[in-house]
Amino acid sequence: MKKLSTVFVLILLLKISPIMAQNTQAKILVLIHSDNGGTYELAKEIASGIESSKTASAVIKLVEESQNSKLKNIPIAKVDELPSYDGIAFGSPVYFGNISTGMSRFLSKTVDLWTNHALEGMPATVFMSAGSGAGKELALQAFWNSLAVHGMVLVSNGIRGTESINKAIPQGNSVLGVTSMASLKDVERPTKDERGLAELQGRNFAKTALALKGTFARKQSVAATAASSEDINHLLKQKSITLPKVPQPAGNYKPYVRSGNLVFINQVALKDGKILNPGKLGVDVNEEQVKEATKATMLNVIAVLKDAVGSDLNRVKQCVQLTGIFNTKDDYTKHADLMNTASDLTVEIFGEKGKHARATFGASSVPVNSSVEIQAVFEVE
Ligand SMILES: Cc1cc2nc3c(=O)[nH]c(=O)nc-3n(C[C@H](O)[C@H](O)[C@H](O)COP(=O)(O)O)c2cc1C
């Protein structure tokens, strides 16, 4: 009887531990404006500090689109999504002892969140990239002013980490948040120590965010609720859909090309470096094997798409067209059945946005002896 109850408790623990793991994860937004990429460099360190504990995840987003090639694949944050996080790390360049115009423009769009108390009690921390560093403390303080009006819980750095930095050169340590002084070219900026302080700031911030998770009212606007419930990156995790590594091109071409808002992708059934279920349907492989290869091919397409949208699949507006080419005998006619595997997967992931126009046809051969090739066109933000 005792043994039986031990087994029961074990089963119960196994069942609830994934749920508990989910609840003990803090989801943190690293929200930045950056002109030249200095703030982004600090943001990456902040994000890595946040994720170092394995109890928090970080996503870096921009407040507005950037033409800078270092920044243009970073997703853009929507104002309404802010309340869906457990904490926000804000980063901006210093502009005349203040936050940058881009950050200011974004914050001025948060009036509805403010009057709905939507960010009250949520932890926030700030970091900044400066030029010479003139007025950097004023700028950090100015950042705090706006966030204090939102009622956010401001997490400072204090003198954390400053004992171990190289004091022979100017460093961007500051008690309110880390900075970097990009125009001081004595060493590469951010310096190793500034990066280390940013990492530490992220690490400490994750602890606070996790501790406060669930303690503040998330008065989300309707749009925010919808946004979080439709989070496609989250949905993939929920459905245990794992995207493969982006297959590398085998010739003088790119995995995807973006033209305007359209992304063009072509993939075959490459899985773990080999073609899955290769050959001709009815000769080398059966329909089930081709369906399996079709699913692998579509996952490759979506992995490439994720790359094209800076890792945020929420930026996909529509799957416009899928074309499935199958390696079949001349008299084969059920291409549509095979292609449904790809179409169903696309709709499962993207919902209405996954519904597409479609073409299928048979070919006497397909490159690298794949049983299938998929050509895809997506509209993205
Ligand atoms: C309008 C403007 C005002 C600036 N004011 C300051 C300032 O007061 N103090 C300072 O140290 N740097 C100042 N800078 C320099 C930026 O803070 C610096 O270039 C920063 O590294 C840019 O960050 P980013 O690389 O993320 O774009 C200013 C830059 C601009 C464009």
Image: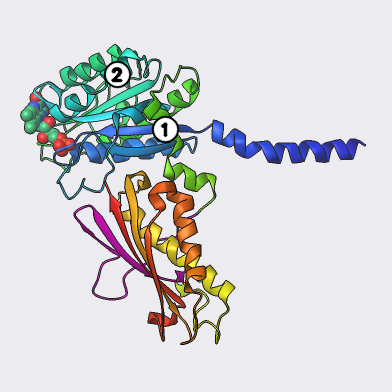
Q: How far across and down, in percent of the image, does residue 234 sit?
A: 46, 42
Identify the amino acid type marked 1: Ala
Label 1 packing within 10 angstroms: few (<14), some (14-19), many (20+): few
Q: From this view, report whether residue 28 is shown above or below residue 299.
A: above
Is residue 70 shown left or right of residue 296? left
The answer for how far apart the CA atoms under marks 2 and 1 are is 16 Å
Q: Is residue 243 magenta?
A: yes
- Tell me which colouring the rendered structure shows: rainbow
Kindly tell me whether residue 246 is visible in this rendering. no
Quadrant where ligand 1 appears: top left
**Residue 182 located left or right of residue 176:** left
Q: Quadrant of residue 120?
A: top left
Element carrying mark 1: helix
Which residues are the magenta region? 242-271
Q: Is residue 147 magenta?
A: no
Secondary-structure class at tag 2: helix
Of 275 and 166, which appears nearest the observer?
275
Residue 204 percent coordinates (x, y): 40, 27
Q: Residue at x 40, y 54 (%)?
A: 355
Is 119 drawn above or below residue 41 in the view shown? Answer: above
Most extreme residue toward the right, as rendered? 1
Q: Mark 2 near mark 1, Cβ–Cβ under 8 Å?
A: no
Q: Position of residue 270 (x, y in %)?
A: 44, 71
Name the one closer to the observer, 208 or 307. Answer: 307
Residue underneath mark 2: 112
Mark number, residue 172: none
User: Which amino acid type corresponds to the residue marked 2 in the rendered image?
Assistant: Asp
* Residue plotted at (31% across, 31% down): 164
Residue 229 visible within the image: yes
**Residue labelled with disc 1:** 226
